[in-house]
């Protein structure tokens, strides 16, 4: 039952041309009819065309002699032979390529007879499976790497497209807002020559929410470098300028620094009563000036007509003439007072000039300049001619100012809406930046994984190069191993023949000793039978002697002595027989001891043969 776990090749009996050895009583191996195992692999097949390691193995062949030599026993090697072989490494372990690619038909048939093809098939299948798993793992890693690269590429493209479109929209909106603010600031700067047009829309947000420092490199929490795209710079809309043929507009004398009525906290433009009152006074003064101008023009025309009429008239009465002169002087003094009053009133209006006519000329020029500037500031068709009255120009200016105030209010509302949109866009931009940071982190992880995969691939390539070097070493060792196998075969044949001769001699000696033991046992049994007969005879004689001693004691004294002598003789013979029995028993014990030694030697030889078979099996498994 101990041989159940042994392979079939070791359990079954070997075919041999020598006479089969007799069954030993102490042999644990049961007799079994030898039979061939079913073939699962065609050994006539040359094997795989390539080893899968390098193309050089496919072209490599080992020239071995094709001698057909009958061999009855497998190749066996002992540990001493392996240790004494100079071709083996110091470690005692040899690993090389599959033998099926380099062994000839004779060695393959011997392996087939020994039943080791199953183990070789198992080893080959295991190696193929490991190689296939390694290739599948490498292919899987490569596919994962390609999929990761493709995913990263798609994410980068999608993120770039989405963020580029978003940033373009934000830049466009910011540019529009900047253009609008530049227009308003430029318009306010140009209007400061006539009036203080600095009442622009104020920021309704507090200083905590907006960065008021002049930092062009910052936008919220992100730098401008994150918003630089390939979009071309957009030129700002320039402020309209008057044509070169227009006359130079002098500074208006009615400029007065006005206090702004817009409040940052309230975000509303409250009317200033003082300003309204001043505007009403200005309008009334302008009307009075216009009336005075008309009156002066009528006076001038009247005086001209009078002078023309008086040039040809000669007064007849001096008294009447003096009265008329006095009246005219009185009228002239009154007119002079009125003119001085008018001049003072015109001077109070703030126009430049040494007299009223110059002030009026300045006023007319300023009205004309205001008319032209109004046309420049508010492009469009104006029906008023350049020679129109100041009241009409003032009415038109007030109308345009009301329209501009209305539009400014609408623009302020739009700017507030744009600020809200800008805040929402900034929040969205912050969210996009956060998402981009997450994507960058994921990209970093993916790059780290890719670097690990690349390092693993490089390690596998280095291992492959080492394996190729090992294959070259295996190819060099194959020829040496073939020579070693042939030498081991020769030594095995010699050892087998010597073992067969020794075994035959020992069998003969054992047979002869067993025959001697059988003859001695027969002699011993005959001697024991004879001694038992003699003892029975002695007992019968003793009984007969004791029976007849009483009757023959007196009559046969001489016969008693003779009988005593015969009894002594028989006793001496019995002692001799006992001594011969002791010597035969000692010889039997010695023969038994010698037989046990021979059996132990036979067992040792069998154990050595089994160890040789196991060593050969291990060598083939390593192969």
Image (cartoon, grey):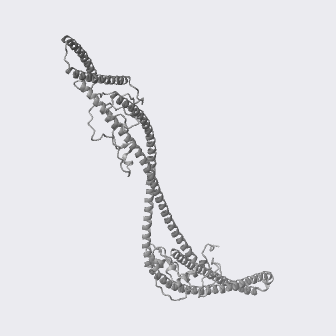
In the image, residue 354 above or below residue 90: above
The residue closer to the viewer here, 156 or 486, is 156
Q: Quadrant of residue 41?
A: bottom right
Q: Name the quadrant of the N terminus.
A: bottom right
Q: Residue at x 74, y 83 (%)?
A: 538
Q: From the viewer's perspective, is 531 left or right of 209?
A: right
Measured from the top left, where is residue 284 in percent x and y? 34, 22
The residue closer to the viewer here, 293 or 270, is 293
Q: Quadrant of residue 316?
A: top left
Residue 374 appearing in the image: yes
Q: Residue furthest front?
A: 316
Q: From the viewer's perspective, is 586 left or right of 175?
A: right
Q: From the viewer's perspective, is 170 left or right of 385?
A: right
In the image, residue 338 above or below residue 156: above
Measured from the top left, where is residue 571 in percent x and y? 69, 83
Measured from the top left, where is residue 251 in percent x and y? 27, 32
Q: Residue furthest top?
A: 319
In the image, residue 80 above or below residue 505: above
Measured from the top left, where is residue 183 in percent x and y? 36, 39
Residue 206 appearing in the image: no
The residue closer to the viewer here, 74 or 440, is 440
In the image, residue 473 above or below residue 452: below
Tally of numbered tags: 0
Q: From the viewer's perspective, is 123 left or right of 392?
A: right
């Amino acid at each position: 039952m101990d041989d159940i776990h042994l392979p079939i090749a070791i359990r079954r009996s070997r075919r041999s041309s020598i006479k089969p050895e007799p069954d030993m009583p102490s042999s644990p191996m049961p007799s079994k009819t030898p039979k061939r195992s079913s073939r699962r692999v065609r050994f006539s097949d040359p094997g795989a065309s390539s080893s899968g390691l390098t193309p050089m193995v496919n072209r490599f062949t080992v020239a071995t002699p094709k001698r057909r030599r009958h061999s009855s026993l497998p190749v066996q090697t002992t540990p001493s032979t392996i240790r004494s072989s100079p071709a083996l490494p110091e470690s005692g372990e040899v690993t090389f390529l599959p033998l099926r690619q380099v062994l000839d038909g004779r060695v393959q048939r011997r392996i087939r007879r020994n039943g080791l093809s199953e183990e070789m098939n198992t080893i080959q299948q295991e190696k193929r499976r490991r190689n296939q798993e390694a290739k599948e793992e490498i292919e899987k890693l490569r596919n994962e790497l390609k999929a990761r690269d493709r995913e990263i590429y798609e994410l980068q493209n999608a993120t770039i497209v989405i963020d580029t479109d978003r940033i373009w929209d934000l830049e466009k909106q910011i540019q529009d807002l900047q253009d609008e603010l530049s227009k308003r600031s430029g318009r306010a700067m140009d209007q400061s020559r006539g009036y203080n047009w600095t009442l622009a829309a104020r920021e309704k947000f507090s200083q905590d929410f907006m960065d008021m420092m002049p930092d062009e490199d910052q936008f919220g929490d992100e730098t401008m470098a994150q918003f630089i795209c390939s979009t071309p710079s957009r030129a700002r809309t320039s402020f309209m300028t008057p044509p070169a043929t227009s006359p130079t507009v002098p500074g208006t004398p009615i400029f007065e620094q006005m206090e702004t009525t817009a409040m940052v906290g309230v975000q509303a433009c409250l009317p200033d009563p003082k300003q309204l009152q001043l505007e009403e006074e200005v309008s009334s003064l302008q009307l009075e000036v216009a009336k005075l101008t008309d009156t002066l023009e009528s006076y001038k025309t009247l005086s001209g007509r009078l002078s023309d009429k008086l040039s040809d008239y000669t007064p007849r009465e001096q008294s009447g003439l003096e009265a008329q002169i006095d009246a005219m002087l009185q009228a002239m003094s009154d007119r002079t007072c009125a003119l001085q009053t008018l001049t003072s009133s015109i001077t109070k209006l703030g126009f430049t000039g040494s007299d009223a006519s110059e002030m009026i000329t300045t006023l007319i020029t300023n009205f004309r300049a205001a008319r032209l500037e109004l046309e420049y500031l508010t492009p469009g068709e104006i029906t008023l001619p350049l020679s129109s009255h100041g009241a009409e120009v003032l009415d038109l200016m007030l109308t345009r100012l009301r329209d501009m105030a209305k539009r400014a209010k609408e623009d302020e509302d739009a700017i507030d809406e744009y600020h809200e949109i800008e805040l929402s866009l900034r929040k969205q931009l912050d969210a996009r930046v956060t998402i981009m940071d997450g994507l960058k982190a994921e990209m970093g992880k993916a790059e780290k994984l890719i670097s690990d995969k690349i390092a693993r691939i490089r390690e596998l390539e280095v291992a492959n190069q080492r394996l190729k070097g090992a294959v070259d070493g295996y190819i060099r060792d194959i020829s040496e191993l073939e020579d070693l196998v042939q030498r081991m075969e020769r030594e095995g044949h010699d050892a087998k023949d010597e073992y067969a001769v020794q075994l035959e001699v020992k069998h003969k000696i054992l047979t002869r000793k067993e025959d001697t033991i059988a003859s001695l046992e027969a002699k011993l049994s005959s001697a024991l039978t004879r001694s038992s007969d003699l003892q029975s005879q002695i007992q019968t004689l003793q009984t007969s002697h004791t029976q007849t001693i009483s009757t023959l004691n007196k009559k046969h004294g001489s016969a008693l002595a003779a009988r005593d002598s015969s009894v002594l003789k028989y006793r001496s013979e019995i002692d001799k027989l006992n001594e011969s029995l002791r010597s035969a028993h000692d010889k039997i014990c010695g023969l038994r001891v010698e037989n046990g030694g021979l059996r132990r030697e036979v067992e040792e030889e069998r154990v050595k043969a089994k160890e040789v078979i196991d060593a050969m099996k291990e060598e083939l498994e390593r192969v």
